[in-house]
Amino acid sequence: MTLSLLLQHIVNALSLGSLYALIAIGYTMVYGILRLINFAHGDVFMLGAYVAFYGITLVSLPWWAALLIAIVLTAMFGIGLERVAYKPLRDSPRISIMISAIGASFLLESLGVLIFGGRPKGVPVPEVLSRVIRIGPVSTVVISLIIPLFTFGLLAVLVYIVNRTKTGMAMRAVSTDIEASRLMAVDVNRIVSFTFGIGSLLAAFGGIMWSFKYPQLNPLMGVMPGLKCFIAAVIGGIGSIGGAVLGGFLLGGIEIMIVAFLPTLSGYRDAFAFVLLIVVLLVKPTGLLGKRQTEKV
Amino acid sequence: MLEIKKLSVHYGGIHALQGISLSVPDGSIVTLIGANGAGKSTTLRSIVGLVKPSGGEIVWNGKTISGQGTKEIVEQGIVLVPEGRRIFPNLTVEENLFLGAYARNDKPGIKSDMDRVYELFPRLKERRLQKGGTLSGGEQQMLAVGRALMSRPKLLMMDEPSLGLAPLVVKMIFEIIRQINAQGTTVLLIEQNAKAALEVAHYGYVLETGRITLEGKGRDLLNDDRVRKAYLGEGQ
């Protein structure tokens, strides 16, 4: 394998890892706050991609405007989803809210088939993004460079919000002790909404970028990435944002590299995530960056 | 002035509070003593809106607050230092204190209140950048009290502040309660350590299985035969 080919694989791994990381953060943040696995998160990712698609094709917006509008709308949708499907069950046994999450996921997928149609749609990738550029020995499409770049930017903003702002401080407080946060006059509902908003925003961005990189949409496109990113969050240590990012890049990297170096195994591409999950859970059940937590009574 | 009128609370089939009435006048220290499970914590939790009463009324400065949300109640100057302290272990000491002032927006005021808390508890200043979870039990209690003070409470309620602490630290905590009260904050205290509580309190109530069975000035209760037998472990 030549150096230039290796570098190309690294660019691909970084860009797939970025997409995984963006989605995994949504799982981990919601879990951190509500101890809920938001099974509908992968479908929010799908929704983001479709909204941008219709923005470009139906309303003929410029792609960047469609991107921004789709992100905002999807974030609002995520907030609404929590209000309707999860909030009424917040004081119910944990299994109820989990079933509601699975139901929400199936509902969104079926609605997707009903409204968007089951037939895959080709995405008109903006010319700027699909252009091939050469940097030294590496030639790659612009989108594969843009994805990691924007991802790092968004991560920096997220880290700033969580660690340096009042709302971020409240998020960290709510994630350890909801009741004590209430006693500090923290509006817990607002914090939960904010968390769902951020998670859905990142998923929408990921979904749209995904649709520019692999330019085909179908209503079930969120299922596999959603499952893998849930695994990425668990591998990294669910509840930890750094863990979700690490898990996402790890998963993306391994997937690309195994296919690159062992092409005979490329048919098993999707299985690697599960193998990695099993290994990590056997060796370190709390995930790579997860902390052992004693269950509160 | 806080007034509780015939407050009832049900947990499922259990009648935890069976119509208790009490009042906490401005500027006083009032204590509620009683055995485990008598309903002390439930009383405080209902005042601050964490538990919904099934009957009766809680009135704060002439306004009914029972039925309001915790956020609204805390913003009106009633704050609870919960049992077991419940500081945020993953946040630094300073962030814990900032959270206490979450409802406020006056930066200079928050800063000066933080200095005041550090003056009251120099240990917290030394550890201000440390995570709350790394503090000792006594330091965590200081942090919980400091955090509550950051909201500038008019009524400070404390649930078992002495629980699990060394005798010297307990003494210090009660001294601090006296100081806070002397500076004008009304205190409602519940304690299993009845002696310490009655010594510091102006007025006390004895709660038994959801009912108030006895009330009086702190000193009088200390000398009451029934209290001495039941709660001070004397005169078997």
Image (cartoon, coloured by chain):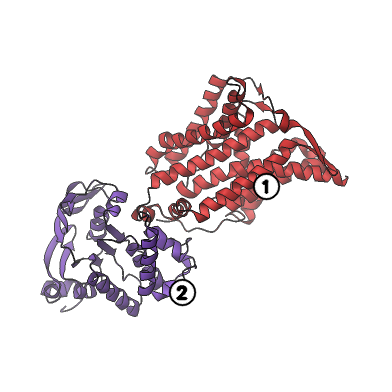
Chain colours: A red, B purple
In what quadrant of the picture does the N terminus of chain B appear?
A: bottom left
Q: Is residue A36 above or below residue B210?
A: above
Q: Position of residue B191 (x, y in %)?
A: 25, 68
- Answer yes or no: are tags 1 and 2 on the same subunit: no
**Residue at image point 37% right, 59% down:** B100
In what quadrant of the picture does the C terminus of chain B appear?
A: bottom left
The label shown at residue A283 is none
According to the image, label 2 marks what residue? B126
Q: Residue type at mark 1?
A: Phe
Q: Quadrant of residue A209?
A: top right
**Residue at image point 48% right, 60% down:** B90
Q: Is residue B181 in view?
A: yes
Q: Residue type at mark 2?
A: Glu
Q: Is residue B37 in view?
A: no
**Residue at image point 48% right, 34% down:** A76
Residues under numbered marks 1 and 2 in contact, where contact means CB atoms less than 8 Å apart: no
Q: Judge the density around disc 2: few (<14), some (14-19), many (≥20) Cα neighbours within 10 Å.
A: few
According to the image, label 1 marks what residue? A249
Q: Quadrant of residue B224?
A: bottom left
Q: Is residue B21 above or below residue A42?
A: below
Q: Dot 2: what SS?
A: helix
Q: Dot 1: what SS?
A: helix
Nearer-the-camera pick, A181 or A144: A144
Q: Quadrant of residue A59?
A: top right
